[in-house]
Image: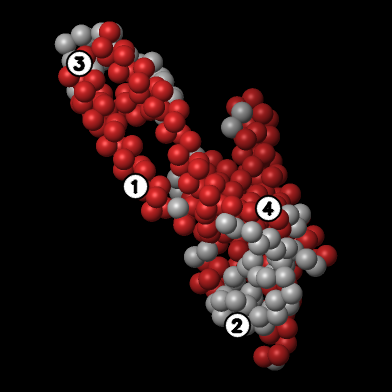
């Protein structure tokens, strides 16, 4: 009995979590089709003229898809030896958030509109199409951001300091000119908007000296944009290895194993 249960648990895990097998790929393709269908239904439902004609159909179809997603969520949990590794993972949280809104709609009017969160589940397309290079590249980008966080934090702190100083200076220059710089927080807001080259135009200096300072800030903004890009680029270029393995550990749920790996790098469990 225990062996039979373990066999079916492993079978379900292979279908749900593996993108290499025909059944696993078919499962993911069907899942993505349902996700896209659900999003389209929510979008069409928001159009009053269409919703008036097909309200009952939208309601029925959305509940059918929600029930399917609920069963899939439960299957993902029971197919793992350590369910918490899926429940509290990124995709586990996204999967749960894609289910809850429809049930909340029973108690809160309009909550089903949050079902559009299911669009985040389309990230699974990388596993379905086996675009492992892009999966690995996204991992490299995350690693690059993590390794650069100290430098970026110092950079952001420096930029905030510059914005406060320049904003305070602009307040002193423009405070009596009725140009919108009627407080230091507003002036700092203007400095941030100008440094980032957004330029809403809701506040603008009118004095010659204020306009001169603004011109310097605008030029400074262009050079500032390139700095974090350079920091991340250097860290990103240090990530070389590209893997094509899409297998997920049936015990802890870790993925991105090395090509040809027989055991999980996290818990040592044998993988398929």
Give the residue number, with chain letter if any, for mark 4: 134
- Left/right placement of residue 115 relative to residue 210 reads right
First-in-chain label (3 vs 2): 3
Q: Residue at x 64, y 42 (%)?
A: 39
Asked if labels 2 and 1 touch by Cβ distance under 8 angstroms, the answer is no
Mark-to-mark CA distance, 1 and 2: 38 Å
Residue 58 rendering spot, x and y as whole percentages: 66, 41
Neighbours of disc 1 within 10 Å: few (<14), some (14-19), many (20+): few
**From the viewer's perspective, is the residue at label 3 or at label 4 nearer?**
3
First-in-chain label (1 vs 2): 1
Give the residue number, with chain letter if any, for mark 3: 173
**From the viewer's perspective, is the residue at label 4 or at label 1 nearer?**
1
Query: Which picture quadrant has residue 132?
Result: bottom right
Q: What kind of element bears circle 1? A: helix
Give the residue number, with chain letter if any, for mark 1: 154
For the C terminus, which image quadrant? bottom right
Picture mark count? 4
- Left/right placement of residue 18 relative to residue 233 reads right
**From the viewer's perspective, is the residue at label 1 or at label 2 nearer?**
1
Q: Residue at x 29, y 31 (%)?
A: 163
183 w.r.t. 179: above or below = below
Mark-to-mark CA distance, 4 and 1: 30 Å
Neighbours of disc 4 within 10 Å: few (<14), some (14-19), many (20+): some
Mark-to-mark CA distance, 3 and 4: 51 Å
């Amino acid at each position: 009995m225990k062996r039979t249960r373990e066999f079916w648990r492993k079978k379900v895990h292979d279908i749900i979590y593996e993108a290499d097998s025909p059944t696993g790929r078919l499962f993911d393709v069907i899942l993505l089709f349902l996700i896209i269908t659900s999003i389209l239904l929510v979008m069409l439902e928001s159009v009053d003229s269409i919703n008036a004609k097909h309200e009952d159909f939208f309601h029925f179809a959305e509940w059918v898809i929600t029930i399917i997603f609920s069963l899939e969520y439960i299957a993902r949990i029971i197919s793992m030896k350590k369910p918490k590794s899926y429940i509290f993972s990124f995709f586990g949280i996204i999967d749960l958030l894609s289910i809850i809104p429809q049930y909340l709609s029973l108690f809160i009017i309009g909550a089903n509109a949050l079902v559009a969160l299911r669009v985040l589940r389309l990230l699974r397309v990388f596993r379905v199409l086996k675009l492992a290079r892009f999966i690995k590249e996204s991992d490299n980008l995350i690693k690059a951001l993590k390794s650069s966080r100290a430098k970026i934090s110092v950079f952001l702190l420096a930029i905030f300091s510059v914005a406060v100083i320049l904003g305070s200076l602009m307040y002193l220059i423009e405070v009596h000119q009725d140009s919108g710089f009627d407080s230091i927080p507003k002036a700092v807001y203007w400095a941030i908007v100008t440094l980032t080259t957004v330029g809403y135009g809701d506040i603008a200096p009118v004095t010659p000296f204020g306009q001169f300072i603004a011109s310097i800030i605008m030029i400074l903004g262009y050079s500032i944009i390139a700095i974090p890009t350079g920091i991340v680029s250097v860290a990103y270029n240090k990530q070389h290895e590209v893997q094509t393995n899409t297998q997920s550990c049936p015990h802890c749920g870790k993925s991105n194993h090395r090509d040809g790996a027989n055991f999980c790098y996290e818990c040592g469990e044998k993988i398929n």
